[in-house]
Image (cartoon, rainbow, N blue to C red):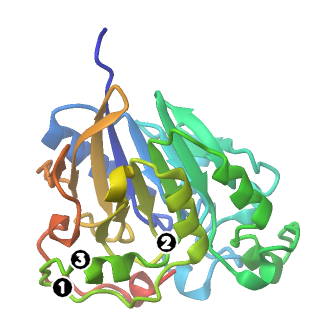
Amino acid sequence: MSTQSLLIAGVGDIHGRFHRVEAWMEVLEKARGRPVDLVLAVGDVEAFRRADDQRRKMTKRLMPAEFAEYADGQRQMKRPLYFIGGNNEDFEALHDAPEGMELAPQVYYLGRAGLQTLRGLRVAYLSGIHAPRFFEQPLKRPRALDTAKQAGYFRAPEVERVMHARDVDLLLVHEWPRGIVQRARDENTPSARPLPSYWIGNPITRRLADTLRPKWMFCGHSHKGFAVSLGGESGRPVTRIACLDQAARPDEAVFWLEFENREPVRGGWGLSGAVAWQAGAPWNLQSLPAAGPHAALPEEERELG
């Protein structure tokens, strides 16, 4: 039987920077000596046509709205980009496509929740963040700023839909699962960087991770790189979690994986092509790239969420 080999690239919160992501993928392809088969974005993609759209957060309106060039046919993605929703999206445009849609050639919204097979990989996903007050409330059409904000919260039926997925290769969520920082603390793995606050994340995405037990899980939202594993005890399958920085700098905003016949065999951070993990190796804080000082960023690029 021939081996199906895939290179996928997970990308953190894009916030409208489509040109940058395209350029990054070209660098990664040269480094790995092969094409990127899939780009998977973990929410806050912001596929707006106008940077000053009133539905965007005030601090985000100074950031690019490059999606218009793709929607209008001026540019086209060279490789397919699939994304889930975060809590900052053009929810009015996405509302009538809860099952997903193609927004522009090679740019696909996966939908609010579900499971899809992409190039042979079983990818489960949940868009949005957790807001307990709205968890049981029906989703309203986002006609104004308040309902647009509420559209960025996932609902109970959506979570239930994903809960039934099995044999999952990759789980995409926007907000971190609760408890993974404490897991890293408990492991007492030496790390040169300070750990995030233990309260980061939510219990719903943690329950998804514990129930589905995917091979890998990608997260965004908190604009920090993080690496931790769940499971492994009593023969339980291991889920390796990669939390991605926002797409302002590639070192921790991009994490790539190579699969062979649906089995992950190696992966790495950033664009150098260097391997940070291979099958059989541990996945923890020491798997992160060496922390270094970052150049000062504009204020709008420093804002979380």
- Using the numbered discs, state the Cα–Cα distance from disc 1 to disc 2 in whole angstroms: 20 Å
Per the image, label 2 sits on a secondary structure element best described as loop
**Outermost front residue:** 234
Question: For the residue marked with disc 1, what is the amino acid?
Answer: Arg
| Residue 209 coordinates in the image, percent (x, y) | 50, 60
Number of the label disc, if any, that sits on residue 187: 3
**Mark 1 surroundings within 10 Å by alpha-carbon count, few (fewer than 14), some (14 through 19), many (20 or more):** few
Question: For the residue marked with disc 3, what is the amino acid?
Answer: Glu
Q: Earlier in the sequence, mark 2 or mark 3?
A: 2
Along the viewing direction, whichever of 6 and 184 lies nearer the viewer: 184
- Would residue 61 appear left or right of 41 to someone viewing this image? right
Residue 110 higher or lower than 95, as above or below: above
- Per the image, the residue denoted by label 2 is 177
- Would residue 108 appear left or right of 10 to someone viewing this image? right
**Mark 3 surroundings within 10 Å by alpha-carbon count, few (fewer than 14), some (14 through 19), many (20 or more):** few
Quadrant occupied by the N terminus: top left
Q: Earlier in the sequence, mark 1 or mark 2?
A: 2
| Residue 202 coordinates in the image, percent (x, y) | 56, 78
Number of the label disc, if any, that sits on residue 193: 1
- Residue at 73% x, 78% y: name it: 149
Residue 178 higher or lower than 10, as above or below: below
Per the image, label 1 sits on a secondary structure element best described as loop
Question: For the residue marked with disc 2, what is the amino acid?
Answer: Pro
Residue 52 higher or lower than 234, as above or below: below
Number of the label disc, if any, that sits on residue 212: none
